[in-house]
Each structure stands twice: as structure tokens, then as C-alpha cells.
Image (spheres, rainbow, N blue to C red):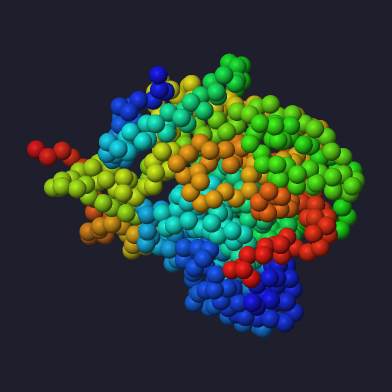
Amino acid sequence: MSELIRRTAAELSGLLSSGEVSAVEVTQAHLDRIAQVDGDVHAFLHVAGEQALAEAAAVDTARKAGEQLGALAGVPIAVKDVMTTQGLPTTAGSKMLEGWIPPYDATVVRRLKEARLVTLGKTNMDEFAMGSSTEHSAYGATHNPWDLDRIPGGSGGGSSAALAAFEAPLATGTDTGGSIRQPASVTGTVGVKPTYGAVSRYGLIALASSLDQAGPCARTVLDTALLHEVMAGHDPLDSTSLTDGYPDVVAAAKAGATEGIAGLKIGVIRELHGGDGGYQAGVMARFDESLALLTKAGAEIVEVSCPSFTAALAAYYLILPSEASSNLAKFDAMRYGLRVGPAGVEAPSAEQVMAATRAAGFGDEVKRRIILGTYALSSGYYDAYYGSAQKVRTLIQRDFAAAFGQADVLVSPTSPTTAFKLGAKLDDPLSMYLQDVATIPANLAGVPGMSLPSGLADEDGLPAGIQLLAPAQADDRLYRVGAALESLLVESWGGPFLAKNTLEAMK
Amino acid sequence: MPAISRDEVAHLAGLARIEMNDAELDRMAGQLDVILGAVAQVREVAGDDVPATSHPMPLVNVTRPDVPRPGLSAEQALAGAPAQQEQRFRVPRILEED
């Protein structure tokens, strides 16, 4: 296997700027890797090989001409299929958008292009980002590169698997309740959900607008920071885009790795720590080891309590479906996407065509959540369900505010378990939802969160993840603590985490 | 008694414009009942004095100067249309037949 695909984005950046390798060579190495393993992994829904090589050649030409280029110019990236890409298919994992070619770029995609990253293709996901396994993709599940019979997490399982299988050094994600962090956790990669409003939502196919947040995915904390810096920034096309408060995350990642974290206060959230929350023993063992490393590095560990977090999952599964049922009303078979006529009806009405199209174009999970949201918003139930859920949201924000009064960052396991077997939870939606029990509070409150690998669980030898949470607009704290912990862990492992993957197909 | 009946699911599916056959309605009603049972606890958590939060960060209205700027061309806008006619979206009939 080409050594180039094992490199971090930061290393590739150095090799490219010194002229040791060309962007075309780096891109070709990743396209070769995709051709070699993606038949098994199925991380990509669309590979844009020719376009990627043309973009890479243009970067090489610009570099030779002496143009000033950004740090990630010429570095390949995999883009989650929920982001519109002009001229490239965008399906959000749904039959509803099969064959649709967007006429415009999402702001995130435009920023990637301006920074001259090379788009390798579009990654698989649960349909409209609803799920924790990618099994709800209309185009078939993605397989976890640690064990091909297991899920890669979701909804962004295509992006996480592409990173873990060395098909791309960087990927984009979106996180509504954990869709960046949980896939990172179960594939041994790194992912960050930034502060709500830090990355523009323009051109992202919306799931729940008050929760959705795009963010960076990579194999190291520094690479994640480098991509974060490119993706984040004010955008007048998104009314919820933040106008200020963008900390220097790259500087924070570098400082964490070199200067450490002595004196920092780290809060362990009591409600997200073992107990009856369904946390796997091996996940908790690795979590406790990480705490011990942080303590040894001079951080102070304190316990904090966030009592309302026990109601976060319930509030989330009312707020999300409510917003989703409204957002997905736009798929009405009139202006773009699928149109299906009802069987045996001559000259059907627009309403009948809508109902037949939505029956054919949406998968089961999408239908479930639309019906649930329609119920929660209907007259007579609105106050009891949607209204109550919004009050819980207030309580969760208050819990975070109190906890951040006692600690600089908060920590928990990212996902309560390691990757489960494909098919294991498909008939039990509620148990699938429990995958996100620790990640959901951050979305409800808008605060940033990171997942990074904490080690392998003893009972199954699969990756476990630790989650860091920081106050809104203090995303730099995630990178500082994340980079410090990562360097301690890598030292204890004697090498990068993914080197532990012994699966023959991934060699 | 279930939190949601099969008839209610059928009514909601109609409101959401999703055609569903009998088998789907049966399965959906059972699954939604389990989910609603689990989320019902939100009603017990917050007292009347707790305000609702709709959005994680403070919202401000956003405006821009009222000057024309380029948008999609008609061809671009219609490129993904299921059907088109005379530079317009062609849609099924929207009125009842006589």
C-alpha cells in the first residue's frame, strides 16, 4: 500500500508545500485505495475521480506558479452526501434525490474549494441523516473497517469509515444528535461538532434546523483543527451563522500537544458515567484510563451533575421529528427529485402524486420520524409534547451553564457501546436511539463537542471513544485538551491508534 | 391503552402526505407507541415557571441591502424538475375533477 494514504493531512500539507509530492500523486494514491477497498467498505456513494485529478493538477500548477496557497491545498477530502455539490450527485442517502445534480454549492463546499482541497467524492449516510448505523441509507450500509460485519456509526458512517480505511485523510460531517461524534467513536477516528452557528448550514439538506451543525472529521486532533478552520466562519446566507467568536483552534491543538493542560479543570458528568445507562464495561475502562492520564498531566478532575440530561433523549426525539417533519415537507415531487404516480389512478391529483412519491421515496425511519413529528406538532398534543420538550431544553442549557462554572471542559464516553453488528438494532428503533444518549445534550444546548479514540474495549477489541464538551464559542478548549490527551494516549500505545487495526482486508 | 392508535397513525400519514398500506400502518402504530411511551417523560420534567427554548443561540433578524444579485437561471432551476413545460414546472392537476 502507498505510504501516502497513511499520512495525516498535516504531514501531506508539509510534503505538498515542500514539493516532495504532487497533489496529483496524493489524489491518485487515495483513488487507488478507494478502488482497492471500497467494494468491501462502501464508504462512498459517488467517486469523482476525474474531477479530483483535475482539481489536484490545478493545485500543482498554481503551486509551481508561486501562488500563495492555504495549508490544506491539494489535500484530498471526502464530502458527506448531505452537502450540495454543484455538478456532483447529492442524495442525502435517499431514493427521493436519486440522480439529482444540485445547481449550487453549499457554503462549506465553496470554502473547501477556495482552500483548494481536492474532493474525492460523496460519502454514504443514513437517509436524511436519520440513524446511527448508515443502515438507513437507501443505497446499502457502510461497513466498519475494524470488522466488516459491524456498523460504522451514523449518520456519517461513510465519512468515518473512509477515514478509518485510509480512503481519505479528511472528511466532512453533520451532527444533529451525534452524527459526527458517534461514527468517530466506533471507527477510532476524531470528529468535532462545532458550536451551533460556527459552520454555515447553507446548502446542507436540513434535518432539524435548530440542532444541525456541520463539522470536521479526521484521524488526528490537529487534522480536525486544520479542517475546522477552513469550514467555520460567518456566512450571510445562513441567518443563524455566528458573526464573531471564532477561536483559533489550530493554535489550541498545537498548544495542547506541546504545553499540556496542567491546572485545567475537567468535569465528569455523573449522569453520563456508567450506572444503568447501558455503558459497556470496556468503554468505561478506557474512559477511566483517559481520566487517569489527564490527572497525571496535571488536570484536576471534578464530578459535575447535570440532572436534566436524563430527559435529553426524550426531548430530542420530540424536537427533532417536529423540525424534520416540517423540513422534509419540501420533498413534494413538484420541482426536483422523485415523482411517482399512484398505481391505477388516471389523471391523479397533485396531492395523490405527493403521497405516492413520499411513500416510494422515503425509507421506514424517515416515515417514522415524519409521523412522530406530525403527531407532536398537532393541535391537542403540541403543549404536552413539543412545548414540554422545549422547556427541557432550557433546563439542559442551565445544567451546562452550572457545570461550566465548575469545570473548563466536561467529559463522558462518546457512545455507550462499541460498534454493534449490522442488523442488530434495525427492528428496535428505540435501542438505536440510545446510541446518542451522551451526544444529544450538546446539540440541544448548542455547545461544541469532540470525540477521539480512547482505546480498544477488552471484551471485543473494538474502538471506544471519549467525548469532550466545551462552552459555546470555546471550541478551542476541545482542541487543547483533545490534543493533550491524544499525545498521552499515542505515547501509551506506541503509535497511532489505527495501527491497532489488524483486519487483513484493511492492510 | 396504547398512546397512539392505528386510526390516528392513518390520519397523521394523510396529513404528512405519505401513502401507507395496512401492514405498514400496523407496524408503524406499534413502533410509535413504544417511542411515545419512552418520550412521554418530558411532560413530568419542567415546571410551569420554566420558559421554552426554541433555539440554542440568541437569534437576530438578518437583512441585506435591497439590491439585485444574480440567482439561478431558469435552465438551472428547472434542471432537476420531474416535468417541465414552457420554462415552468409542470405539475399534476391541483383542482378536483368536475
Direction from residue A304 to residue B28 in the image, left or right: left
Residue found 42% across the figure and 60% down from its top: A102
Residue A468 visible at all: no
The answer to whether residue A194 is left or right of residue A14 is: left
Q: Image point 59% across, 61% down: which residue?
A: A145
Please name whichever residue, B28 or A311, is drawn nearer the observer in this view of the structure: B28
Q: Residue B65 vs residue A222: left or right?
A: left
From this viewpoint, which residue is outermost toward the left?
Answer: B98
Q: How many marks?
A: 0
Q: Where is residue B55 in the image (x, y as percent from the top left)?
A: 57, 35
Q: Where is residue A241 in the image (x, y as percent from the top left)?
A: 59, 47
Where on the picture, by quarter, is residue A370? top left
- At which x and y percent is residue A176? 56, 44
Q: Residue furthest top?
A: B48
Q: Nearer the viewer, residue B66 or A369?
A: A369
Q: Quadrant of residue A113?
A: bottom right
Q: In this view, does A440 lie above or below B5?
A: below
Locate the N terminus of chain A by quadrant. Answer: bottom right
